[in-house]
């Protein structure tokens, strides 16, 4: 059956959602460290806040996308905001998606050089080739790709976390309100949970809005809810595992790699591969969101634009991975706050209007 018949399952929708969020920062454990672990056990409250927002906003994006029959993020924001706001957000989204693609290309090079002891450029070019290959399959190819890889990534993250909880000795809990190198407010787990979701929203919106004319409303909402809850569970498991190895784990740029080393050295290479796969799924999400902005998924133009954007991102990929993340991700977070507010309110407007009447 063709995906145009609106037969995309809840599982595949949730996989696309999770695939957009579980990137290098997530799989490495650094995002969880900076946004939640620094608050100690109270970080769990931040995880709960983030999970509720991820579930609601994922369902909201998909519900609105189906309502307006969208095939890309621009069609959705045109229906949710004034024309001038939509133009600004469109330009910002294109820049952010291209920048995010550069971060993933750079991250691929970093994995090859730091963890696999291979030169960085083969890692960058291999990712570029793989992204182009996935995009040649159009939306169906992107969906199949996420349906296979995302469950593997989530299962690996949860298994590693469970092994740490079962096998490792407990460390001292972190000092509450430690300073984070990200853009979160020190000592405020609630703000941290909100910002964690907001900085993911631009990419999530770009990916999920491409399903608006391909899924049913009921499956769309269910897929958004399931995807958000699964992401929350993965974040919570990583948090608990990191707390058990604190404070030593705080000194590592790739906490999950340290966690794997505590279990056994044989896991180091599999974890490096896991991080690379997370980079790959996020790179595909960025390229797909950009390509769908300019052409229907699966068309010749879609494939050309997708590959062209990936090539366009190459120059930035030469910069240091840590520098790119520290510069670009905070911008993602603050830019996503406005869109998060719009997405939060929009599904509720019909009910608000009835109350006023």
Image (tube, grey):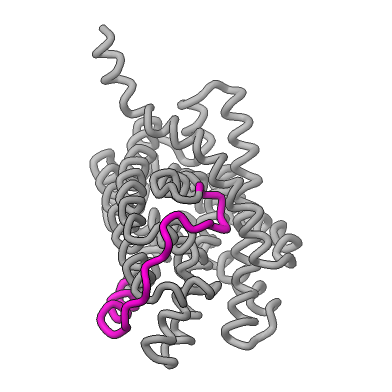
The structure residue drawn at horizontal position 61% and vertical position 46%, both measured from the top left corner, is 331
Residue 12 placed where, x, y %? 32, 57
Residue 112 placed where, x, y %? 61, 80
Residue 154 to residue 35: above or below: below
Quadrant for residue 139, please give it: bottom left
In the rendered view, does 69 fall on the left or right side of 226? right
Residue 17 placed where, x, y %? 39, 53
Span shown in magenta? 158-185
Pick the quarter of the image with the C terminus. Answer: top left
Most extreme residue toward the top, as rendered?
357
**Camera sees residue 206:** yes
The structure residue drawn at horizontal position 29% and vertical position 18%, both measured from the top left corner, is 352
Residue 89 placed where, x, y %? 59, 34
Pick the quarter of the image with the N terminus. Answer: bottom left
**Camera sees residue 276:** no
The structure residue drawn at horizontal position 35% and vertical position 31%, both measured from the top left corner, is 67
Of the pair 308 and 195, the residue shown nearer to us? 195
Query: Magenta segment: does it hold 178?
Result: yes
Residue 33 to residue 352: above or below: below
Predominant SS along the magenta part = loop
The structure residue drawn at horizontal position 24% and vertical position 13%, both measured from the top left corner, is 355
Query: Magenta segment: does it hold 117?
Result: no
In the rendered view, does 18 fall on the left or right side of 182? left
Of the pair 139 and 196, the residue shown nearer to us? 196
Of the pair 75 and 344, the residue shown nearer to us? 344
């Amino acid at each position: 059956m063709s995906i145009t018949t609106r037969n995309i399952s809840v599982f595949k929708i949730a996989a696309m959602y999770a695939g957009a969020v579980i990137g290098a920062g997530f799989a490495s454990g650094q995002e969880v460290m900076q946004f939640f672990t620094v608050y100690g056990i109270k970080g769990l409250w931040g995880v709960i806040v983030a999970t509720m927002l991820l579930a609601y906003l994922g369902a909201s994006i998909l519900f609105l996308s189906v309502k307006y029959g969208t095939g890309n993020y621009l069609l959705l924001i045109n229906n949710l905001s004034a024309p001038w706001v939509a133009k600004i957000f469109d330009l910002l989204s294109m820049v952010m998606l291209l920048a995010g693609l550069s971060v993933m290309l750079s991250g691929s090079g970093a994995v090859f050089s730091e963890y696999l002891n291979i030169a960085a450029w083969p890692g960058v070019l291999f990712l570029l080739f793989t992204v182009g290959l996935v995009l040649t399959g159009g939306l169906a190819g992107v969906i199949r790709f996420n349906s296979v890889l995302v469950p593997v990534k989530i299962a690996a993250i949860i298994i590693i976390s469970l092994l740490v909880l079962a096998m490792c000795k407990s460390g001292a809990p972190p000092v509450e309100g430690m300073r984070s190198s990200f853009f979160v407010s020190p000592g405020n787990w609630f703000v941290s949970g909100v910002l964690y979701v907001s900085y993911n929203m631009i990419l999530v919106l770009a990916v999920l809005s491409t399903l608006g004319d391909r899924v049913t409303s009921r499956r769309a909402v269910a897929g958004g809810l399931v995807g958000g809850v699964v992401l929350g569970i993965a974040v919570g498991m990583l948090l608990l595992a990191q707390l058990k190895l604190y404070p030593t784990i705080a000194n590592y740029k790739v906490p999950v790699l340290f966690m794997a080393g505590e279990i056994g050295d044989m896991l180091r290479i599999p974890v490096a591969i896991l991080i690379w796969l997370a980079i790959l799924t996020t790179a595909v999400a960025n390229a797909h969101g950009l390509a769908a902005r300019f052409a229907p998924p699966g068309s010749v133009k879609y494939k050309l634009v997708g590959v062209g954007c990936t090539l366009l991102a190459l120059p930035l990929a030469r910069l240091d991975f840590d520098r790119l993340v520290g510069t670009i991700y905070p911008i993602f977070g603050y830019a996503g706050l406005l869109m998060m507010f719009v997405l939060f309110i929009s599904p509720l407007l019909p009910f608000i209007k009835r109350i006023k009447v």
